[in-house]
Image (tube, grey):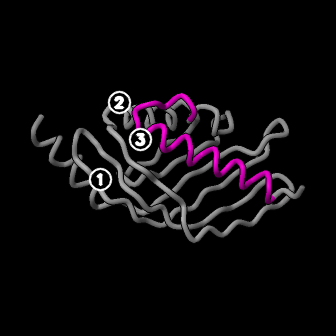
Amino acid sequence: MTNLDDVRRASVAFYDALNKMAQGDDTAMQDAWIKGDGVTAQHPIGGRDVGIDAVLASFSKVAQIAGGGDIRLTAQSLHAGSDMAVETGVEVGTLIIAGHEARIEHRVTNVYQRQDGAWKLAHHHTDPSPGLLEILGRLTEAA
């Protein structure tokens, strides 16, 4: 078994967790990430979170208003060293936020790190999502 096989499993676990979040359940997301202050995420709705608590809180907020969807990684490119790996690709699918459906299609970079013998996510960065930003803008105006 190679590091790439282990990292691919970590990627599958992250995208499974992302899809559970889309269904309103953020618990699997907690297990997909390394623990520590060096964790970062730059989301399709903007912003940058630093540290595991901030990153998990942002996914939890989305889960609270999520109502379904399906997000998949396509065009995956994966490169792994002994304790760090980089994955790039395109996230595609849909996400329902507060009853509004947005089409997902943006580039993504994920960085995985081996921690305590297991590969987990250390950084997640996507392009901004015009569809998600439009929905959030409408929700803010209605509030």
Q: Which mark is residue 132?
A: 1
Of the two numbered discs 2 and 3 on the same chain, state the one appearing first in sequence.
3
Q: Which mark is residue 22?
A: 3
Based on the displayed image, in which of its 4 quarters is residue 63 positioned? top left
Image coords of residue 130 (percent x, y): 28, 61
Residue depicted at 29% across the width and 53% down the height = 132
Of the two numbered discs 1 and 2 on the same chain, state the one appearing first in sequence.
2
Is there CB contact under 8 Å for labels 1 and 2? no
Residue depicted at 48% across the width and 61% down the height = 91
> Vertically, is 33 above or below 79?
above
Image coords of residue 79 (percent x, y): 75, 66
**Observer-nearest residue: 25 or 54?**
25
What's the magenta region? 4-28
Q: Which residue is mark 2?
A: 64
SS of the residue under disc 3: helix
* Number of other residues with Cα within 10 Å of mark 2, as a class: few under 14, some 14 to 19, many 20 or more: some
Residue depicted at 80% across the width and 56% down the height = 5
Image coords of residue 16 (percent x, y): 56, 44
**Residue 102 horizontal side relative to residue 51, left or right:** left
Question: Mark 1 and mark 2: span between their CA atoms?
Answer: 15 Å
Q: Which image quarter is the C terminus in?
A: top left
Of the two numbered discs 3 and 1 on the same chain, state the one appearing first in sequence.
3
